[in-house]
Image (cartoon, helix red, strand yellow):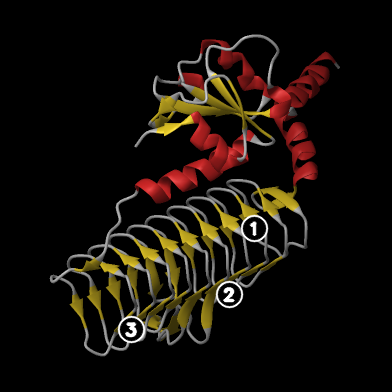
Amino acid sequence: MNFTARQIAEMIHGTIIGNPDVSFSGFSKIEDTQPKTISFIGSPQYVKFLSETKAEAIIITKRLVPDGQYNTTLIVVEDAHQAFVELIRMYDKLTKNDLAGISPNAFIDNTAEIGKDCYIGDTTVIMKNAVVGDNCKIYPQVFLGTNVTIGPGTTLMPGTKIYDNCHVGSNCLIHAGVVIGSDGFGFTQENGINVKVPQLGNVIIGSDVEIGANSTIDKSTLGSTVINDGVKLDNLVHIAHNVEIGANTVIAAQSVVAGSTKIGHNCLIGGQVGISDHLTIGNNVRIVSQSGIMHNIGDNETVMGSPAFNQKSYLRSYACFRNLPKRLNETDDASKNN
C-alpha cells in the first residue's frame, strides 16, 4: 500500500518541506533507512542521519529541523515520536488482515453467546454459558471455559486458555499461550504430606489490558485475582492467586508477583523482578529490573536491589561494596607495614 507525503502530513497534521507527492510503502529505522520508506527523527542525536538517509520522507520534530538543503522530504510536527506512533497505528488498522466469520472446525456450545462481527478460528473451543462480545477476534486453538465472558473488541491470539468463570474486559489483547485462571499454588500439610487446597475463585481482567505471550494469571482460593484497566504485562509474567494490580501498571518480562500482594496504579516494574506474598506496593512506584521485593513500598518510591530498598541509597551502598576489595587490600598492607 503506497502513501504520499501529502497524505501522511494530513493524517498527522504536519507541514511539508520538499516534494509533497513523493510516495513510499513501508517504514524503516533512521539509522538504517531504505528506499521507498518513511522514518522519523524525534531526538537531537539522530539528526546526523538526515544527511545520509535513503528514506523518501522523514517525520521530524519542529525544533530539530536543521538549516540548509535536504535530500529527502520532511514532514514537520511538534512531536515526531508521537506522530510516528499515531501513523503506525493508522497503518496497522488499514493493512492488517480483516478476519471474519466462525470456522466450521470450532466447537461452540449451544448455550454460549457470540456477538456480532466476530472471528473465531479453527479448533477453538467455547464452553457452556460463555459470552463473547461484539467485534472480538478469537484465533485458532483458543479455549474458553464455562461462564467465561469476553468484552467487545478483545483479541485472543492462538492458544490462549481461559478457565471457567473468568472475565476479560473490552479492547484487550491477549497474546499466544497465555493461561488465565489456572489454579493458585495452594497446599496445606497433613501428616507431612502436601495436600491441595481447592481454588474456588476466578480472575477478573479490566479493559484495555495487554498480556504478553506465555504469561500466566492464577485464580484465587476465594474471591478474585484482579488485573485493572490499562495494565500491560510483558511475556512470561506470572501473577499468583488473589493478587490485585492497579490501573495502568506495567510489568516487564519474567517478573513474578506472589499470592495476595496488592500493587497500586501507574507502577513501572522492570524485568525479572520477584515480589513476595501479602505485600502492599503503593501508587507510582518504580522497581528496577532484577529487584527482590520483601516488604511494603509506599507511594512514589523507586527501589532496586535484592532485598530492594531506596534506589539512591542502594547506589551509594553499591559504591562502597564495589570498593571493598581495594579497602581490604589497603588494610592488609597497612597491617604488614606495622
Residue at coordinates 52% horizontally, 64% vertically from top-left? 208
Residue at coordinates 58% horizontally, 41% vertically from top-left? 12
Q: Residue furthest left?
A: 105
Q: Earlier in the sequence, mark 1 or mark 2?
A: 2
Q: Neighbour class for label 1 at 10 Å: few (<14), some, many (≥20)?
A: many
Q: Residue furthest right?
A: 338
Residue 263 found in image quarter: bottom right
Instruction: Locate residue 71, reporting x and y percent.
Output: 53, 11
Q: Secondary structure at mark 3?
A: loop
Residue 215 found in image quarter: bottom left
Position of residue 160 in the picture relative to residue 210 (left or right): left
Up-down relation of residue 69 to residue 167 (above or below): above
Q: Earlier in the sequence, mark 3 or mark 2?
A: 3
Q: Secondary structure at mark 1?
A: strand
Instruction: Locate residue 111, reporting x and y percent.
Output: 26, 90
Q: Amino acid at mark 1?
A: Ile
Residue at coordinates 54% horizontally, 21% vertically from top-left? 73
C-alpha span from label 3 to label 2:
27 Å
Q: Amino acid at mark 3?
A: Ala
Provide the residue designation for mark 3: 130
> What label sits on residue 328 in the rendered view?
none
Provide the residue designation for mark 2: 260
Provide the residue designation for mark 1: 293
Q: Amino acid at mark 2?
A: Ser
Q: Secondary structure at mark 2?
A: loop
C-alpha span from label 3 to label 1:
38 Å
Q: Neighbour class for label 2 at 10 Å: few (<14), some, many (≥20)?
A: many
Callout 3–callout 1 Cβ contact below 8 Å: no
